[in-house]
Amino acid sequence: MTAFADPTVKVLATEADVVAEVATALVTRLAEIQSVGRVPAIVLTGGTIAALVHAAVAVHPRARDVDWTRVEIWYGDERYVAADSPDRNAVQARESLLDHVPVNADLVHEMPAADGPFGPDLDAAAAAYASTLRAEPFDIVMLGMGPDGHCASLFPGFPQVHAAGPVVPVTGSPKPPPERLSLTIPALSNTRDIWFLVSGDGKADAAARALARDARVDDVPASGPRGLERTVWYLDTAAAAHLR
C-alpha cells in the first residue's frame, strides 16, 4: 500500500503573504529539480489565488533561475467550454504566467475544449487527456478549494470523488459552467508534493472540515488528495480561523 504524507499547515497573515510564499516555493523547487538534471512536471489549478500566484511567479526575481523551456505542465481540471473562453483555467494560466515566460508549447498539456475534436463527447475528451498523463509521479500538484470543500472539479456528493481512473467527465456541476473534466483523487495524488492554496474567511469552514481526522471525501473532496512526500496547505489567517 502506498504511504501518503500527512498534511502540513502553513498559516500566513494575508492572502498576499500566501501568494508570495507559494511563488517563492515554486520557482525554488523548479530550479532545484532542474539542477539535478530532471524536467519538472507540475499540475496547475485555476481560481483567483492561483492567478495571483502565477502573476507573482512571472515577475519573481528567481524566475530567471528556471529554464521554462524544460518545465512540463498539466491541469488538474478544466471547464468544458470553447478553447478561448476566459472561463478556462488554461486561458487564465496563459494570461497570468505562461505568456510571460518562455515555455515550450509541446510540454504544456491543455485539456480538450468543447469546440475541439471531441465536440460534446466528454467521455472521449477525458480518455484523450488521460492518455497524455505520465505514469511516474508529478513533482507538484497545486490545488484550490471551494467554500463547499471541492477541489479540481470533484464536488461533494458526486460519484467522481470515488473514481479510480485518472480523468473523469463532470456534468451538472453546482458551480457553472456545468460540464468539466477533472483529474481524480488517485491521479492528483500521484505526485511528490500537493500544495493547497486557500484564502478568505469564506473557506474557513471547509478548510477545517478538510483537515479534520474524520474527513470524508463524499463531504469534502479536498480531504482526499495527498502527496507521496508532502501535502502542504497554505492558508491565510482568515481561512485558518476554524482550525482546531
Image (spheres, rainbow, N blue to C red):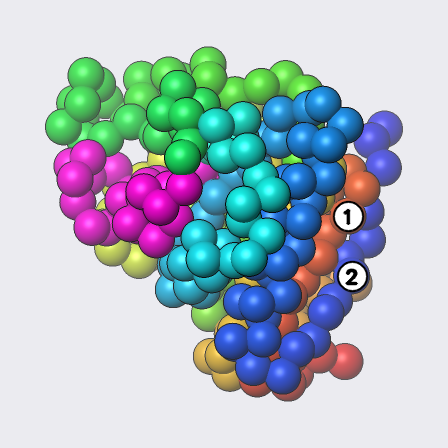
Residue stretch in magenta: 75-101
Residue at the spot 73% in from the left edge and 39% down from the top edge: 32
Q: Is residue 139 above or below residue 5?
A: above
Q: Assign the N terminus to one quadrant of the image.
A: top right
Amino acid type at circle 1 is: Arg
Which residue carries the number 2 mark? 8
Specify whether residue 82 is painted magenta. Answer: yes
Q: Position of residue 237 (x, y in %)?
A: 62, 83
Amino acid type at circle 2 is: Thr
Q: Position of residue 15 (x, y in %)?
A: 52, 76
Which residue carries the number 1 mark? 230
Q: Are marks 2 and 1 in contact (CB under 8 Å)?
A: yes
Q: Is residue 69 above or below residue 141?
A: above
Q: Image check: 242 left or right of 4? A: left
Specify whether residue 54 is painted magenta. Answer: no
Q: Image check: 120 left or right of 135? A: left
Residue at the spot 46% in from the left edge and 70% down from the top edge: 147
- Res 187 quadrant in image: top right
Q: In this orientation, does residue 204 appear?
A: no
Q: Assign the C terminus to one quadrant of the image.
A: bottom right
Residue at the spot 69% in from the left edge and 24% down from the top edge: 38
Q: Position of residue 84 (x, y in %)?
A: 16, 39
Q: Image check: 109 left or right of 43? A: left
Label 1, residues with CA under 10 Å away: few <14, some 14-19, many ≥20:
some
- The residue closer to the viewer here, 196 or 97, is 97
- The residue closer to the viewer here, 222 or 85, is 85
- Res 180 quadrant in image: top left
Count of numbered badges drawn on the protein: 2
Q: Is residue 161 above or below residue 39?
A: below
- The residue closer to the viewer here, 19 or 192, is 19
